Amino acid sequence: MQFSIRGQQIEVTEALKDYVDKKLSRLEKYFEAPPTSEGYVTLSVIRGLHTVEVTIPLQGVVLRAEDRSDDMYASIDAVVDKLERQIRKHKTKLNRKFRQVGSHKTVFVEEGTPTGAASGEQYDEDDLEVVRTKRFAMKPMDVEEAILQMNMVGHDFFVFTNIESQEVNVVYKRDDGKYGLIERD
């Protein structure tokens, strides 16, 4: 598996590249054949936090994980752990839904195939269980009012009916401190 490694506000040393390659090579045991697509790794330092973002486009799925910590190497380790959990969850989901030959499940190694992976780890439907449902009336408002409401309740996102389009939209707070808006196509 090939990765494009780049740095933002940090110089990517050979030691960092080697560490990223070594850690991400652990993911290869989960695939029938090594993915032909190129993965993308971004290492950055923002306000003293070392951030690692990894995106791996595959057939029918995109694996993506991000982690921040005070240490770049710890962030790399945490991102790889997150990606392994995503792969195992996705594989379990695909194995449950697609039983026919030629489905997406052939991207991942079958159960029982010796891969050196930790055995005994099982994910069941409880991992995807909805534990709480909220219902609320959405009064129509403009984007600015929705941002104010979001900040008042102290959440990172806010669902509202846009007064201009009469459609349900979502405003959210971005990592850079600015705001984003999600609209339907």
Image (cartoon, helix red, strand yellow):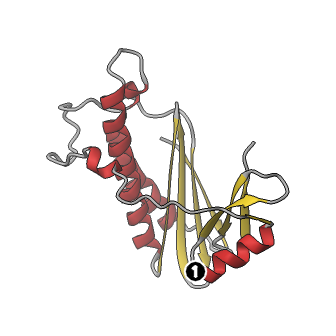
Left or right of 74: which side holds 136? right
| Residue 108, above or below 102 | below
**Residue 29: x and y, percent?**
32, 40
**Residue 102: x and y, percent?**
41, 16
Of the pair 105 and 11, the residue shown nearer to us: 105
**Mark 1 Cα shell of 10 Å, populated few (<14), some (14-19), many (≥20):** few
Total numbered labels: 1
Of the pair 36 and 178, the residue shown nearer to us: 178
**Residue sticking out furthest to the left:** 120
- Mark 1 element type: loop
Q: Which residue is mark 1?
A: 154
Of the pair 52 and 12, the residue shown nearer to us: 52
Left or right of 148: which side holds 2? left
Q: Quadrant of residue 10?
A: bottom right
Q: Quadrant of residue 34?
A: top left
Amino acid of disc 1: Gly
Q: Quadrant of residue 151?
A: bottom right
Residue 130 makes an appearance in the image:
yes
**Residue sticking out furthest to the right:** 164
| Residue 86, above or below 44 | above
Q: Quadrant of the C terminus?
A: top right
**Residue 67: x and y, percent?**
48, 67
| Residue 117, above or below 148 | above
Residue 177 makes an appearance in the image:
no
**Residue 25: x and y, percent?**
39, 48
Q: Residue at x 43, y 58 (%)?
A: 133
Q: Residue at x 54, y 80 (%)?
A: 49
